[in-house]
Image (cartoon, rainbow, N blue to C red):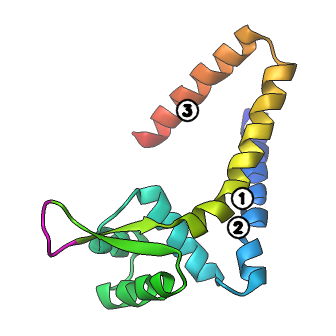
Amino acid sequence: MLEKEFERLYYKFRENYCKNLFECVKEGSLNPTDLYCLEVIFLLNKPKVNEFAEKVNISLPNASYRINNLIAKGYIKKLVSEHDRREYHLEVTDKFLNNYGANASFNIKLMNRIREDFSKEEIDVLERMIRRIVDEIME
């Protein structure tokens, strides 16, 4: 039962995420591979080019091609590293965050409904459980 309910929750979050992000594909500005690369760059929080390439398991030339494509479309920018001026960090732009923001508004609505429907004690328990689950995933 727990496994099934957790899977349902996970799939609902993924469904909403995909629905919102793939609006960019409909507009023709991004393809699914672009979206995947943007998501990884966003989640890695300003990775170096080689960190991005390693995470998605592609060569540095392929990563550079994808990065330059996303820069040209205005979805990411390169920032010179403060520690080593030869290295760059990748950062998503507001153009990406505005599309990603649709997911944030979903989360805000969900949190508001949880606050309306659950007691403070239930919310405290839920918060602790989520924190522990995230900690488990991070280990």
* Disc 2, SS: helix
How far apart, in angstroms, are the residues tagged by discs 1 and 3? Answer: 20 Å
**Labelled pair 1, 2 in contact (Cβ < 8 Å):** yes
Q: How many marks?
A: 3
In front of the other: 18 or 29: 29
Up the image or down, 32 lies above or below 11; here it is: below
Residue 7 visible to an observer of this rendering: no
Marking on residue 77: none
Residue 115 visible to an observer of this rendering: yes
Which residue matches tag 1? 17
Q: Amino acid at mark 3?
A: Ile
Which residue matches tag 2? 21
Which residue matches tag 3? 133
In the picture, measured across the screen, residue 28 lies left or right of residue 51, that is right
Q: Position of residue 26 (x, y in %)?
A: 78, 81
Quadrant containing the N terminus is top right
Residue 86: say if magenta. Answer: yes
How far apart, in angstroms, are the residues tagged by discs 1 and 2? Answer: 6 Å
Query: How packed is label 1: few (under 14 Cα within 10 Å), some, or many (20 or more)?
Result: some
Up the image or down, 1 lies above or below 125; here it is: below
Q: Position of residue 53 (x, y in %)?
A: 35, 76
Per the rendered image, the range of residues in magenta is: 83-87
